[in-house]
């Protein structure tokens, strides 16, 4: 109980200091988290894109061997592959909304091939290196002749097959709108040149609606503001019209009647990517006779570009299915999400650190209040005891003087014992008040203090005792520290006093000072346990009945060292007791 009551507590602190120190951990762990998330983001995005690339290649290869085209709906295997390649060549990774399903209105954007720095190219190339079909951008639509869907025909228009500037500009505008968060277009084809046998078309008159979205990629915000409508008439050179016939259509998307008129042309979309990206990928990475995966990387630990060469049989002839996926992981959206996750992680750790420090601060305040109460109680008790002790001592001294000639030996022995115990108790009270005074010092005036000079000054007081007990004292080294001279003197004096008191007769004391520490080493009769010796009123086993020891010397030295920002450590090995003040 006594040990717990008088155990010296760590130096007091404030909530701000605790929180500032605790913030080291959120900062360090956030840095670690940011590095891990950075590389994990790149790896996950690339692996997801490669998985989608492999899945598309499988779909295309399956479509290449499928020969059934009921009612010539698609126009044969080549046309079917052309549409599947343009429609399916697309990757979408790190899509945040997929993690949350439809519970939260999150954007549908992640890391996609619809990014200026990313690409998703597929092409079917013959043995001579000629491109049979690719996913370069094309327009697709469905001609509906009546209500029977079996009679529908899929048609496409390839801007590379017809050198028509107006149509190529329309394709370019559409592809550019993919990179905008707000701009989009809607199309109605009211007339077109059609080659039903080849499943080709060239639009003649198109109603183009300009649309503005607040957030085009948010499926919960699908209402667009129509900012204008333009009728685009595409003039076609007759040289391109061999096998085509002009057909008029009802406007499929603008019909105000519940009954449709036929034929109708339902515009599906412009699918595929820029022809320039297709040409660049083929010229840079296509290798005749190559098979399997090859990679290129701009990142440290993951590949960001994956190329595949696969053999495919189409209408009895062998071709190479070539695909090239380049993943631009760090899009604007990915950067935003990365910063948000790092910030949320840091804020979470900061909140945890704040709550821990707040809880600890509440406990500290209660502990400090109890310590103050204990100290005040001890101080008041010590002050109150000084007066009656002085009276008792005075009476005992007077009685001793009065009875020194007439009193018997037993009576004089009792009086002498009373005076010794009064003196011992008075010494304990004085040191208790000194310890309390040392612990309560708020601010110290610090100067350069010569440690060796303090040790020599302290040792001089015990010169006679050292000579009588034949104890050798050596003081070595030299050091100056920034400290309060009075409190540091108290620490050094108590250490020297303790060493003189407990060094065996004929032993030695060595005081060593350097830039890092002051060490006082003295010989003892036997090793003692140093556990709890720095606590008030705790003595070594041999000193428990020693009336010359209060058990407060080391506690005062420890408190004085702590007030200067130093630490007192004690140890006893090989019959040598060591007390060290570490600066």
Image (spheres, helix red, strand yellow):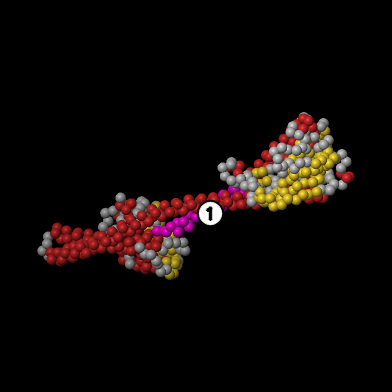
Picture quadrant of residue 494: bottom left
Q: What stretch of residues is rendered in magenta?
A: 12-41
The reply to whether residue 552 is in sight is no
**Would residue 292 be counted in the magenta stretch?**
no
- Residue at point 74%, 36% (across, down): 60
Q: Is residue 265 above or below residue 471?
A: above
Frontmost residue, 49 versus 153: 153
Q: Is residue 6 left or right of residue 135?
A: left
Frontmost residue, 425 versus 121: 121
Q: Is residue 206 left or right of residue 375?
A: right
Frontmost residue, 403 versus 283: 283
Which SS type dominates the magenta stretch? helix
- Residue 346: x and y in percent read 53, 52
* Residue at the extreme left of the image, as rendered: 406
Give SS at disc 1: helix
- Residue 183: x and y in percent read 69, 51
Q: Is residue 460 above or below residue 244?
A: below
Picture quadrant of residue 150: top right
**Would residue 24 be counted in the magenta stretch?**
yes
Residue picked out by circle 1: 27
- Residue 197: x and y in percent read 83, 35
- Residue at point 43%, 70% (across, down): 447
The image shows a total of numbered marks equal to: 1
Classify mark 1: residues with Cα within 10 Å, few (<14), some (14-19) or many (20+).
Answer: some
- Residue 18: x and y in percent read 45, 56
């Amino acid at each position: 109980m006594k040990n717990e009551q008088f155990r010296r507590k760590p130096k007091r602190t404030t909530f701000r200091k605790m929180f500032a120190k605790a913030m080291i951990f959120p900062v360090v762990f956030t840095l670690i988290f940011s590095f891990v998330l950075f590389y994990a983001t790149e790896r996950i995005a690339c692996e997801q894109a490669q998985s989608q690339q492999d899945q598309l290649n499988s779909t295309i290869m399956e479509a290449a061997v499928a020969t059934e085209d009921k009612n010539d709906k698609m126009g044969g295997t080549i046309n079917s592959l052309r549409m599947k390649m343009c429609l399916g060549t697309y990757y979408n990774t790190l899509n945040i909304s997929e993690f949350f399903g439809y519970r939260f209105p999150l954007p549908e954007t992640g890391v996609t091939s619809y990014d200026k720095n990313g690409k998703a190219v597929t092409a079917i190339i013959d043995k001579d290196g000629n491109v049979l079909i690719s996913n370069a951008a094309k327009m697709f639509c469905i001609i509906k002749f009546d209500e029977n869907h079996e009679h529908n025909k899929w048609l496409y228009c390839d801007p590379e097959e017809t050198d028509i500037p107006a149509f190529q500009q329309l394709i370019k505008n559409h592809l550019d709108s993919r990179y905008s968060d707000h701009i989009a277009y809607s199309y109605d084809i009211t007339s077109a040149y059609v080659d039903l046998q080849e499943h080709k078309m060239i639009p003649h008159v198109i109603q183009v609606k300009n649309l503005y979205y607040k957030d085009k990629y948010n499926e919960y915000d699908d209402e667009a503001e129509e900012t204008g409508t333009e009728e685009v008439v595409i003039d076609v050179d007759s040289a391109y019209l061999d096998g085509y016939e002009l057909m008029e259509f009802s406007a499929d998307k603008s019909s105000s009647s519940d009954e449709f008129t036929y034929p109708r042309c339902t515009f599906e979309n412009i699918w595929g990517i820029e022809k320039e990206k297709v040409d660049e990928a083929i010229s840079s990475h296509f290798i005749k006779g190559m098979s399997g995966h090859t990679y290129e990387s701009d990142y440290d630990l993951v590949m960001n570009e994956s190329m595949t060469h696969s053999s495919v049989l189409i209408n009895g002839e062998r071709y190479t299915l070539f695909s090239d996926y380049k993943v631009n992981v760090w899009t604007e959206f990915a950067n935003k999400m990365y910063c948000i996750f790092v910030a949320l992680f840091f804020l979470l750790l900061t909140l945890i650190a704040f709550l821990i420090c707040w809880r600890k601060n509440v406990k500290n305040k209660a502990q400090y209040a109890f310590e103050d109460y204990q100290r005040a109680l001890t101080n008041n008790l010590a002050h109150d005891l000084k007066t009656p002790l002085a009276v008792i001592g005075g009476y005992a001294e007077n009685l001793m003087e009065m009875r020194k000639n007439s009193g018997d030996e037993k009576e004089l022995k009792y009086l002498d014992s009373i005076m010794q115990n009064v003196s011992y108790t008075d010494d304990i009270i004085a040191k208790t008040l000194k310890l309390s005074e040392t612990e309560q010092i708020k601010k110290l005036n610090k100067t350069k203090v010569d440690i060796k000079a303090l040790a020599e000054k302290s040792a001089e007081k015990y010169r006679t005792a050292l000579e009588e007990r034949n104890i050798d004292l050596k003081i070595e080294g030299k050091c100056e520290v920034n400290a309060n001279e009075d409190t540091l003197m108290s620490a050094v004096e108590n250490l020297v006093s303790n060493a003189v008191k407990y060094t065996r007769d004929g032993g030695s004391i060595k005081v060593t000072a350097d830039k890092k520490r002051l060490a006082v080493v003295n010989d003892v009769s036997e090793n003692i346990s140093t556990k709890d010796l720095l606590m008030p009123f705790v003595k070594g086993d041999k000193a428990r009945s020693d009336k010359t020891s209060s058990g407060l010397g080391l506690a005062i030295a420890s408190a004085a060292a702590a007030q200067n920002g130093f630490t007192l450590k004690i140890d006893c090995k090989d019959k040598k007791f060591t007390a060290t003040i570490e600066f």
